[in-house]
Image: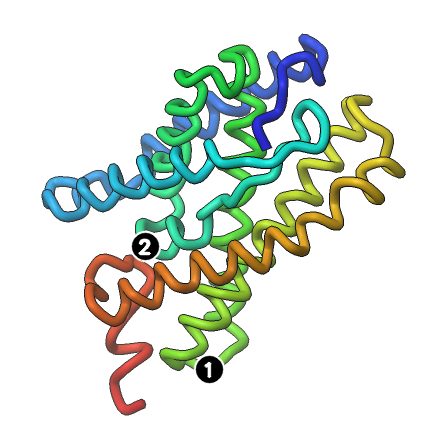
Amino acid sequence: MNLSAGLFSATWHWSALVLSVAVGWLVWRTAPWGRLKSGTQLNLLLGFAVGLMLMWSLKAGVKPGLNLHLMGAMAATLALGPQLAIVTLALALTGITLNGAIEWQAWPINFLLMVVVPVVLAHRLHKLIERFLPAHFFVFVFVAGFFGAALTVMLQGLVASGVMVAAGAYEAAFLASDYLPYFLLLGFSEGWISGGVITLMVVYRPEWVAAFDDRRYLVRK
């Protein structure tokens, strides 16, 4: 998405900074940092960060701030858990900021809309899937990994569009006709790629996927 600083007023930027600091403090207090003592988990987090940074650098644009790119939020959330997924996506965002894709002034609002919102959506969707659908391997892979990833991207686009309308950056009619429809195509691509990554991980390295529990999805199935 890579929102430009010029789309928002100073009030929006300061509010985003305050919220970003609050989220950072909450993540710092609640994240399972002990898992990163394992070299494997740390390498997985850094690998996701580098991969997402490269993926976010490949984008198509409609107008300033209306870029489209894959998110990877569901895959990162399932593999690392929501707190470490936020850390991972924040590192990717910092990487593309260093590359000049966005201004530092716009980092907080991009952090909220490109990192926090999709990770929270992905986490909540996964919890809903666990609550209402059978505990089955294919439910985890196809519903959470594939369809959950696609729905996460589409909902994130809807939330970000709502914020841009509220900020007066773009008219709702323009976004509804010339921007939001592309998220249907983006969601299809996101679902296949994120679902494929999660499938490979749970088949060959299930211990790398924090959300995957052998006792829940494989025992007596």
Image-quadrant location for residue 213: bottom left
State the colouring used for the structure image: rainbow
Instruction: Check whether the beta carbons of the residues at disc 2 and disc 1 lie within 8 A of each other.
Output: no
Instruction: Kindly identify the amino acid type of the residue bearing the numbered disc 2.
Output: Ala
Residue extending furthest top? 10
> Which residue is denoted by mark 1 in the rendering?
134
- The three-letter code of the residue at mark 1 reads Pro
Position of the C terminus, as image quadrant, is bottom left
> Residue 115, how many percent across, how many down?
49, 36
Using the image, determine if residue 160 lies above or below residue 110. Answer: below
Q: CA distance from mark 2 to mark 1?
A: 20 Å
Say few, some or many: other residues with alpha carbon within 10 Å of mark 2 (under 14 / 14 to 19 / 20 or more).
many
The spot of residue 41 in percent (x, y) is 18, 46
Left or right, 119 with respect to 169, comes to left
How many numbered circles does the render carry? 2
The tag on residue 96 is none
Please provide percent x and percent y for residue 154.
64, 51
Horizontal and vertical percent position of residue 208: 22, 57
Q: Residue at x 46, y 47 (%)?
A: 73
Q: Dot 2 corresponds to which residue?
A: 79
- Point 67% across, 17% down: residue: 12
